[in-house]
Amino acid sequence: MREVGGHVSAAGGIELAIERGAEIGGNCVQVFSGSPRVWARPELSRFDAKKIAAKRAEKGIGSIITHSLYLVNLASENPELITKSMTALAFDLKFDAHISGNGVVVHVGSHKGAGWVACREEVRKHIQTLVDEAPEGSTFLIENAASPNGKIGGKLEEVQWLINEIDSPKLGWCFDTCHAFTAGYGLGKSQPTGSALPRTAAEEIDHLGLWSTLKCVHVNDSRDPFGSGRDRHENLGNGLIPQEDMEYFLNLPQLEHVPLILEVPGLEQLGPDAANITRLKKLIHEA
C-alpha cells in the first residue's frame, strides 16, 4: 500500500492533525509548524514527541511532512527578509527532527526579475548554511514552482543545480503536479502541442537525474491551463490536468515509495477530504 494523504490543520496540536489525516482516509500527512502567514514560530517544547509518535502508531500514519511558511524568500536582496527566512526555516528543520518527520517543503522564493544566474549563488549559500546547521534527521525539500519566470524552481534544472551544488543528505525536493503543469511540463507520455519546453515532467526528471532525491509529491489538479504560470489548485478530476496524464505520472515505478500529499480545496472548501483521497487512490489503482 502506497502512502497517500493530505495537508491537514494542526490546530490543537500535531496529534489532532494526525487524527484528521486518518479520518479522511490517509496514511501520511502534511502540516504547518505554526501559522504560514506570520514569522513568529511556536516554542519547540509545545510539541511532545512521545505523544506524537504514539498517536502516529495508533492511527497508522507514516510520513509527516512539514510545509514551511509562505513568507520565505531566500533570493531576496533585503537582508531583514533573509534573516527572518533563515530563522523560520531553521526552526522548521528542528521541528522536523524533533517529531521524527520526513522533510520540510520550502518555496525557495523569487528573484523578482533579477534572473536565476544572478541570484543562485546566494540562494545556494543560504540553503547550504541551513542544512549544515540542521539537526540529524531533518531534510530540506525544495519545491518546484508554478512559474518559470522569477520563481526559483519553475525550471527543474534550477532544482537540480541546487541539489548538485550543495550535495547534502539533508537536501531533497518535492514535486507539485499543478506547479509543473502550469510551468509547462506535461504529466503524460508526451508534451502537449505548442509547449515551450522540450520534455515532459518525467523525461526532465530522468534527464536531470532527480528521481533519487525526490522525497514527496504534491498531488493537485489545476484551475489554470497548461503553461499559464499560475498557481491555483483544484480538486482531483475537476481541473485542467488530463486525468490520464495524472494517472500515468503517479504510477511511474520511481514514485512507488514516495508519499503523495493532496493540497486541494476540498469539495466543501475545507481542504483535502475523503472524496479526494478516494479519487487519488483510484488514480493509483488502490480503490
Image (cartoon, rainbow, N blue to C red):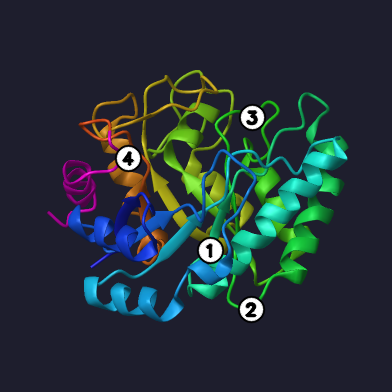
| Displayed quadrant of residue 167 | bottom right
How many numbered marks appear?
A: 4
The residue pinned by badge 4 equals 246
Q: Secondary structure at mark 1?
A: loop
Q: Secondary structure at mark 2?
A: loop
> How far across and how far down the image is residue 9, in percent?
36, 49
Q: Is residue 72 left or right of residue 263?
A: right
Query: In front: 203, or 235?
Result: 235
Q: Is residue 159 left or right of residue 68?
A: right
Lower sequence index among marks 3 and 4: 3
Lower sequence index among marks 1 and 2: 1
Query: In front: 140, or 210?
Result: 140
Q: Is residue 79 above or below residue 47?
A: above
Lower sequence index among marks 2 and 4: 2
- Few, some or many C-alpha atoms within 10 Å of disc 3 (few <14, some 14-19, many ≥20)? many
Residue 148: which numbered mark, if any? Answer: 3
Amino acid marked by disc 2: Glu
The residue pinned by badge 2 equals 136
Q: CA distance from mark 4 to mark 1?
A: 24 Å
- Few, some or many C-alpha atoms within 10 Å of disc 4 (few <14, some 14-19, many ≥20)? many
State the residue at coordinates (32%, 40%). Answer: 246
Q: Is residue 283 magenta?
A: yes
| Magenta stretch, residue numbers | 270-287
Residue 23: which numbered mark, if any? Answer: none
Q: Secondary structure at mark 3?
A: loop
